[in-house]
Amino acid sequence: MAGNLVAGGVALQPSAEQVALSTNYITNFDFLNQYLPDTYEKEFERYGNRTISGFLRMVGAEMPSNSDLIKWAEQGRLHTKYTACTLATYTGAETTQTVTVPLAQLNPGTGAIAVRVGQTVFLSDETAASTFSNKAIVTAVGTGGLAANEFTIAYYEATQAAYAAASTVSMFAYGSEFQKGTSGMVGSLESDDLFLENNPIILKDTYAVSGSDMAQIGWVEVTTENGANGYLWYLKSEHETRLRFDDMLETAMIEAVPAAAGSGAATSGFIGSEGIFSAVGARGNVWNGGFPVALADFDAIISRLDKQGAIEENAIFLDRQFGFAIDDMLAAQNSYGAGGTSYGLFDNDEEMALNLGFSGFRRGYDFYKTDWKYLNDPTMRGDLVGGKISGLLVPAGSTSVYDQVLGKNAKRPFLHVRYRASQTEDRRYKTWMTGSAGGARTSSLDAMEVNFLSERAVCVMGANNFVLFQG
């Protein structure tokens, strides 16, 4: 069957220049890309600075280590105090007494107590609101039918305090007394050191782009979190992978936990590591009663710090809500601050902005507060309910510890990172390219892979001086 031949329309003549003529005017558009979109070549930073690292750079340091295990010793108490001790009798008329120390308080290495014959001791009733106390001299320790956790005393008082039945006492040695012509003190006390250890973990990440994608270049103008600005193409994602890896190097040191015996991680061959939160939660101080929003709350914290290292200056890294709670607490100390407009320092300048926040305060110790982005970021610890942490108090300065690798005492920051390194291998921050594209010539893979690796652990020294604020 013959078809109909349709006559063609007027032939258009394209112009050599962009000039509107009747011969190059198109009236019928039937293709989809007639209107090219207006594009912004600069990437809009709708989340601002997205990185959350920087905490460890502010409060710690980094130093190399060449071992799978990092060990150090921390000084123990110079004096020993025993609590929850029980008495053999409670008549109130004893001239001598047998005191029993709880087994859990024995020296784990020797199984003995730090009490010697001839020492003078102070006993205090632990019953609430009690005023009873006594002073006595130790006459026997762990002999003559006494167990290793028992010792006998002779009271200095003719009539000692009448302790309540089955009450417990606290006891510490304050001196000694010997008769004329007697031998010296029998037995010596060893240093009560705390030996701690941690192991590094290996962190890795990678970014890959195919050779075909590398052949199609599209530029994007960016301003990066590390301060650089300019144009990037396919390596923009590589750049963000690097930033993400940098963040993980810090968050891993904060959140890492050791693999418990019998856990799924342990049976799979992973050992984990002790991060900052884990170390402070186990060996430090934990405040879990909500925000400390009154001076009495901080007085309780200060009382605890008095019993620890008594570090003069401390920094509190906290989330936004905790920061506001401290601001409100400090504002309430101003007798004219009921309306919240009169606290702070002003020079009567009507154009001066009202400052409703505080950077720190002093009450026995200096406390400086700063927002911790990690606790505010909604993609990390921000907006959590279970396991929420609202702040961390970090002591300033350094502490003296015995470094078992160096074999001597060394000054170390309370927080510092140890990374694996030797003369031939530095694993602090390794990056390399593999594949067959983008300059890499290492395999037949038609792509470029950028690899990242680090092996590190954080050392929390003097964790008893830290305070972790939960909830």
Image (spheres, helix red, strand yellow):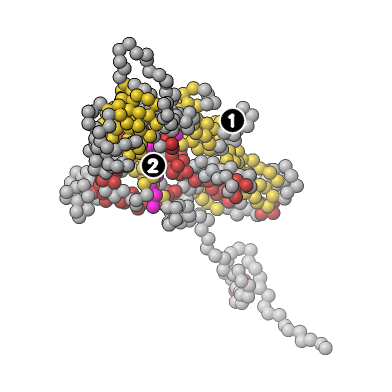
Name the residue rendered at 44%, 44% in the picture. Answer: 281
Residue most extreme to the bottom: 1
Amino acid type at circle 1 is: Asn
Placement of 396 over or under 249, stated as above or below: above
Q: Secondary structure at mark 2?
A: strand
Viewer-proximal residue among 423 and 242: 423
Q: Is residue 460 in the magenta section?
A: no
Placement of 471 over or under 188, stated as above or below: below
Q: Which residues are magenta?
A: 461-471
The spot of residue 302 in percent (x, y) is 30, 39
Q: Quadrant of the N terminus?
A: bottom right
Which residue in the protein does label 1 denote? 66
Q: Nearer the viewer, mark 1 or mark 2?
A: 2
Viewer-proximal residue among 23 and 66: 66
Tag of residue 285:
2
Residue most extreme to the top: 181
The answer to whether residue 255 is left or right of residue 90 is right
Q: Is residue 45 visible?
A: no
Viewer-proximal residue among 8 and 175: 175
Name the residue rendered at 42%, 35% in the picture. Answer: 105
Q: Is residue 468 in the magenta section?
A: yes
Name the residue rendered at 53%, 56% in the picture. Answer: 41
The spot of residue 402 in percent (x, y) is 47, 26
